[in-house]
Amino acid sequence: MTERPLVSDWATDFDHLSEEWAAHGPDILADLRERCPVAKTERFYGAYLVTRHEDIVETARDTATFSNRVTAVNTNHPDKIKLDLSPITLDPPEHGPVRRPLMPSFSPRATDELEPTVLSMAEGLLDDMGDRKLVDGALDYAQMLPVAVMGHLFGVSTEMGPTFRRWVDGMLKEGQIDLSIARTAAREVQEFFADQLRDREELGDDAPDDLVTKVLNAQAELPDGATRPFGRKERIGALFVLMLGGIDTTWSTLGAMLFHLGSHPADLERLVNEPELMPTAVEEFLRYYSPVTIARYITEDAEIAGCPVSAGQRVLLSYPSANRDPDYFEKPDELLLDRENNRHMAFGVGVHRCLGSNLARMELRVGLSAWLERYPRFELAVEPDDVKWSVGPIRGPRSVPLRILN
């Protein structure tokens, strides 16, 4: 990775794409919440970072001032970012008509119907590990399951798995530092989904009932009640963002779950002995290890928590920081498997809240339950501080070496 200038003060010179941030993000955010809840940097053509729960909610809901047209802060100038990821890069009123037709594919009912398939995929991955006593919870499992699920939903060959992983890494990790990697990945993704859409169109009524076909046939709702087909950019953008959102966020959280349980034997033993805790445990893992930090584009000079912010720059909304805000959560820095009051923000807030939250929750629950059924006793095979975390807007463990115990 390219060497980056060291941060002088996280309040005035933050660098969320640095290895220091990847390794110590929660500690950095805790410090900023206390002394500088709206940090600023001159890097990235000038940007801001919001860390407190209340301020993040207020900013996220003001889509007129803080637009979703740009959702990343990197070394590209914000006015040069033209990637269309409809509906996430659309603001109201254009956003809703494109988002709503996608929602039935991720409803609780659709997710329930998919659960047996996800369980079979999880068990297959565990079978592939065989009798090995040393496995990588991230590379061998957590990063594999969401890729398999999304490939199934798109109706593509399982052989696409490594390519999906390369594209996700290229867009959300290496590509955040080296823009040429992101551009290459984006072009390949767009070409791939354009080909998939063309194939479904040629099949007509014989097209499979997969997510590509559903996006091809989706109808945006117009203000007068009429409908129109999605445009080409909307179709490709929707499939693009569903791939990104459906893979990296889930694999990062599942990897973090295995990291935590491998380094906290008491929590592992309790969850194995009290499987009824799984629903609250999943929510608590989502809160404690929230992976996503999202950006907004500032459309006009404004204030956040009394701090002036400038039009034309970007602001980062740290959902991980919001989820450890002591003004909103009791014992925020403790992971409590039985936490009941847990209105976390892992899936975002406002109109752009994650479309696939039902699917993600089910994958995490099924994926972790299947793992614990197969491996009720395991431990981290390295020191916790030796685990490297990913650089970029999605934070998760790059590798989780685990030792399987008898």
Image (spheres, rainbow, N blue to C red):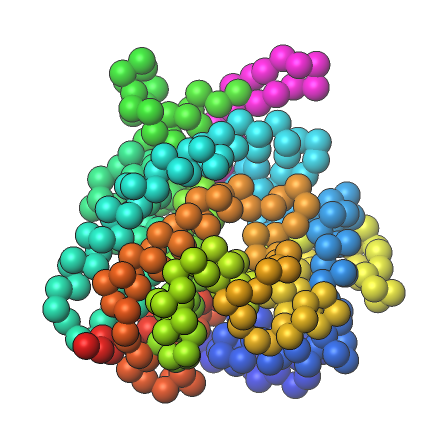
Pick the front one: 30 or 304? 30
The image shows residue 233 at horizontal and vertical percentages of: 50, 32
Tell me which segment is drawn in magenta: 220-237
Pick the front one: 99 or 327? 327
The residue under the point 36% across, 67% down is 273
The verdict on residue 264 being magenta is no
| Residue 401 found in image quarter | bottom left
The residue under the point 31% across, 53% down is 145
Q: Quick check: 120 left or right of 253?
A: left
**Is 197 placed above or below 381 here?**
above
Quadrant of the snapshot with the C terminus: bottom left
The image shows residue 45 at horizontal and vertical percentages of: 67, 64
The residue under the point 28% across, 75% down is 378
The verdict on residue 236 being magenta is yes
The image shows residue 326 at horizontal and vertical percentages of: 71, 72
How many numbered tags mark residues here? Answer: 0
Q: Quick check: 99 left or right of 194?
A: right
The image shows residue 139 at horizontal and vertical percentages of: 28, 65
Quadrant of the snapshot with the N terminus: bottom left
**Is 326 placed above or below 310 here?**
below
Does residue 182 show up? Answer: no
Pick the front one: 12 or 130? 130
Does residue 346 show up? Answer: yes
The residue under the point 84% across, 56% down is 302
